[in-house]
């Protein structure tokens, strides 16, 4: 007997007391999926900024036509001399970053781990923002690049549009269903890399980017 | 604390240099039972100081973030129901999970026990020509003692979570589910790093202080090279989504993302109870878990991946579905609720027993209240330590109140105590005591005689309390003080009072 058959056999014999009906008919789950909580604030963007800043990330409000130059400024302010831009990033981002004297690195051909490690920063778009928890979710579409890009460099400049910010986790999960349906990986980011492993003292900056700068584009 | 030597590879005795720091040996047979361990740990005042500080901090933080959500109780009920639904139809969901993962390009393995799971990891790693793996913190791999199995096979397993790194470099064992080095303070961590880091890779920077930020920085530098060069990574999973074939890892530092993204081959060890039916179910658990575990609104990083993604991350993805005793837990209709556990460790942080004795006393990878109900079910109750674990509690019930999936831990503890007694003990001291008590109280004069004896005892016993004494009551008195018996019983006092009344006194005065 294979291990699979053995395990399934043990499960079935362990569950002899369970009636032979569909799972949903056996146990009711009293939960409305995908709902905005009744207590959600009207000022989603204000809450989002407050909660992201609570993790010691930097948040800047940006108007749409200033996005490219504000990206370049953010990279310069944090001392990055090179930055990787995903293939799907708008051409204006490339131009503005290059114009600021920062070396633009692209992932085509695919960057080695070492090359990526030697790059100062990364600029990505994002998929969803969650106000309640101060979270940004990437689904690694072309304007965000593969997962390693937003992980190895020490500075992450992340652009999010105001219409991408939702109230809470359930609304976010509902929006992300489309990305899951196409089997895209997801990375949920709440502030810069951190640890509380020494005396439960929160310290920002371990293996992921030690600086997270969020540009919130107010349409 | 130097790299130790290990032997035994089948018939020929091969002595080779260890690749990774040696942990202290675990041998269940002969391991002292919980009360003995607890006494030993209680004598360590540094441990108690570290634990009290850490658990108090996280308890207070948890209350704050939980209070932010007015619908917290609804979330707990939903979490409980979703897990119950999954567990009661686990065969269906596991088959669905396997089909989804396979469709996503992952390779699914099934392992009956620890040995099978470890062998699968060893075989895959060898087939890649690798002699090391980087690891994401994972309770399942602790449970199957994967690191030592790999070490014996000549493969080095590098822990990359900061606390796991402290434990590994410290030749130590984890003492907490979430913060395995919770028993160490900053100056102990500094000592471990100074002593050991250089032996296994990049040494700590000059002038290392005990500032947590600097210690975290040392870990960043030490591990970076290991991340960049690793060909194989091993992870666990917090959740495995059946309908989409998605695995989820919840973490803080980014070491998880490194392991899940950079190597070519990823092996995830997943307990069969980690399954959730749908991606939408995560909206419940991604609210319950971070607030209950690190007491944050959201943990810094969560990775979700569905098999192989072309051009992004590992191009060979393995998932090992592990039983290792879980089907035994499932067969117990009261005890099976322990499989709802999402390993948040809120029950450890709130537990008055855990706070005082720490995780090592439980003699199990899963310490604290959840360990006291999970371990004896996973391992069975053959050993002394496993028989004693259901008693490692005062049944105060705080663990049930904080549990995000509403595991009624006190109920399972009592159930398991019953099981231990039925399986292992003949007539118990408790039963004998009750019989004697019944005989004594059956007649007034017998009870009076006993009271006279107690009076006498009270008159001669020095001090106010009766502490530990040898004899049949020693087990009970070992952990409790008994007030010494009064020198006059109520019956004597009453008789005296009635006499005084009859002899013409006004009866107003009390004795």
Image (cartoon, grey):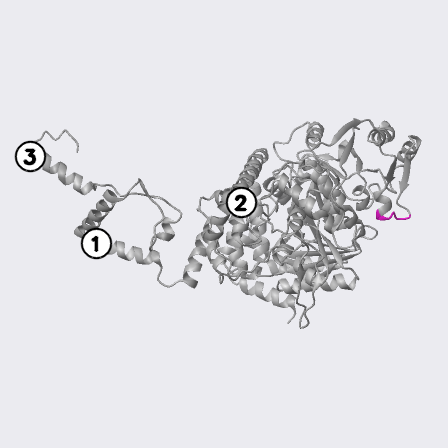
Label drawn at residue B503 = 3
Q: Secondary structure at mark 2?
A: helix
Residue A41 within the segment the image draws in magenta: no
Q: Which residues are magenta?
A: A109-113
For the C terminus of chain B, the quadrant is: top left
Quarter of the rendering containing residue B204: top right
Q: Main secondary structure of the magenta part?
A: loop
Q: For the residues carrying marks 3 and 2, which lies nearer the camera in this image?
A: 3
Q: Chain of mark 1?
A: B
Q: CA distance from mark 1 to mark 2?
A: 44 Å
Q: Residue at 16% of width from left, 39% of height from top? A: B494
Give the mark nearest the N terminus, 1 or 2. 2
Q: CA distance from mark 3 to mark 2?
A: 63 Å
Label drawn at residue B347 = 2
Count neighbours of disc 3 (C-alpha within 10 A) and say few if under 14, some if 14 to 19, many if 20 or more. Answer: few
Q: What count of labels does the image hold? A: 3
Please indicate whether residue B171 sits to the left or right of residue B473 in the image. right
């Amino acid at each position: 007997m294979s291990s699979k058959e053995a395990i399934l056999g043990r499960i079935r014999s362990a569950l002899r007391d369970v009636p032979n009906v569909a799972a949903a008919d056996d146990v009711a789950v009293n939960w409305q999926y995908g709902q905005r909580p009744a207590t959600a604030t009207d000022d989603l963007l204000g809450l989002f900024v407050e909660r992201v800043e609570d993790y010691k990330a930097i948040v800047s409000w940006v108007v749409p036509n200033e996005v490219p130059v504000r990206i370049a400024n953010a990279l310069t302010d944090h001392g990055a001399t090179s930055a990787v831009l995903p293939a799907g990033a708008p051409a204006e981002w490339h131009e503005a970053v290059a114009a600021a004297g920062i070396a633009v690195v692209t992932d085509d051909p695919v960057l080695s781990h070492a090359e990526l490690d030697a790059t100062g920063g990364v600029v990505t778009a994002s998929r969803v923002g969650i106000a309640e928890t101060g979270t940004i979710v990437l689904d690694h579409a072309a304007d965000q690049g593969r997962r390693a890009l937003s992980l190895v460099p020490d500075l992450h400049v992340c652009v999010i549009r105001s219409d991408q910010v939702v109230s809470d986790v359930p609304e976010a999960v509902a929006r992300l269903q489309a990305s899951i349906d196409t089997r895209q990986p997801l990375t949920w980011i709440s502030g810069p890399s951190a640890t509380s492993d020494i005396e439960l003292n929160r310290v920002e900056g371990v293996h992921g980017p030690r600086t997270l700068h969020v540009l919130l584009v107010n349409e | 604390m130097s790299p130790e030597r290990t032997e035994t590879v089948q018939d020929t005795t091969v002595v080779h240099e260890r690749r990774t720091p040696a942990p202290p040996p675990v041998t269940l047979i002969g391991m002292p039972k919980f009360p003995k361990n607890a006494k030993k740990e209680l004598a360590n005042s540094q441990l108690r100081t570290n634990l009290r500080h850490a658990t108090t901090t996280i308890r207070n933080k948890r209350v704050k973030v939980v209070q932010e959500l007015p619908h917290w109780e609804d979330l707990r009920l939903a979490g409980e129901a979703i897990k119950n639904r999954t567990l009661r139809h686990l065969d269906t969901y596991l088959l669905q999970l396997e089909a989804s993962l396979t469709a996503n390009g992952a390779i699914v393995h099934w392992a009956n026990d620890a040995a099978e799971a470890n062998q699968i990891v060893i075989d895959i790693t060898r087939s890649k020509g690798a002699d090391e793996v980087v690891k994401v913190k994972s309770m399942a791999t602790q449970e199957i003692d994967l690191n030592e199995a790999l070490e014996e096979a000549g493969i080095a397993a590098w822990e990359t979570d900061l606390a796991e790194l402290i434990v590994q470099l410290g030749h130590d064992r984890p003492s907490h589910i979430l913060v395995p080095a919770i028993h160490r303070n900053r100056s102990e961590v500094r000592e471990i790093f100074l002593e050991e880091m250089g032996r296994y890779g990049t040494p700590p920077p000059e002038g290392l202080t005990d500032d947590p930020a600097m210690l975290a920085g040392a870990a960043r530098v030490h591990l970076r090279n290991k991340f960049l060069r690793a060909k194989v990574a091993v992870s666990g999973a917090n959740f495995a989504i059946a309908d989409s074939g998605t695995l989820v890892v919840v973490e803080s530092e980014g070491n998880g993302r490194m392991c899940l993204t950079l190597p070519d081959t990823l092996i995830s060890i997943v307990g069969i109870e980690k399954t959730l039916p749908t991606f939408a179910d995560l909206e419940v658990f991604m609210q319950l878990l971070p607030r209950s575990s690190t007491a944050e609104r959201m943990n810094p990083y969560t990775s979700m991946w569905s098999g192989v993604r072309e051009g992004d991350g590992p191009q060979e993805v393995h998932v090992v579905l592990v039983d290792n005793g879980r089907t035994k837990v499932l067969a117990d209709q009261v005890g099976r609720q322990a499989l709802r556990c999402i390993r948040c460790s809120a029950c450890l942080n709130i537990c008055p027993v855990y706070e005082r004795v720490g995780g090592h006393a439980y003699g199990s990878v899963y310490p604290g209240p959840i360990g006291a109900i999970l371990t004896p079910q996973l391992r069975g109750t053959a050993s002394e330590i496993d028989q004693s674990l259901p008693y490692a509690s005062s049944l105060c019930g705080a663990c049930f109140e904080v549990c995000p999936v509403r595991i009624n831990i006190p109920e399972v503890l009592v159930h398991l105590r019953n099981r231990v007694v039925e399986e292992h003990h003949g007539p118990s001291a408790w039963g004998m005591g009750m019989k004697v008590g019944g005989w004594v109280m059956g007649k007034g004069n017998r009870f009076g005689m006993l009271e006279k004896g107690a009076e006498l005892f009270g008159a001669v016993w020095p001090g106010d309390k009766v502490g530990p004494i040898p004899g049949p009551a020693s087990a009970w008195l070992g952990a409790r003080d008994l007030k010494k018996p009064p020198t006059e019983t109520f019956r004597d006092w009453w008789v005296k009072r009635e006499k005084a009344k009859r002899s013409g006194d006004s009866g107003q005065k009390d004795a």
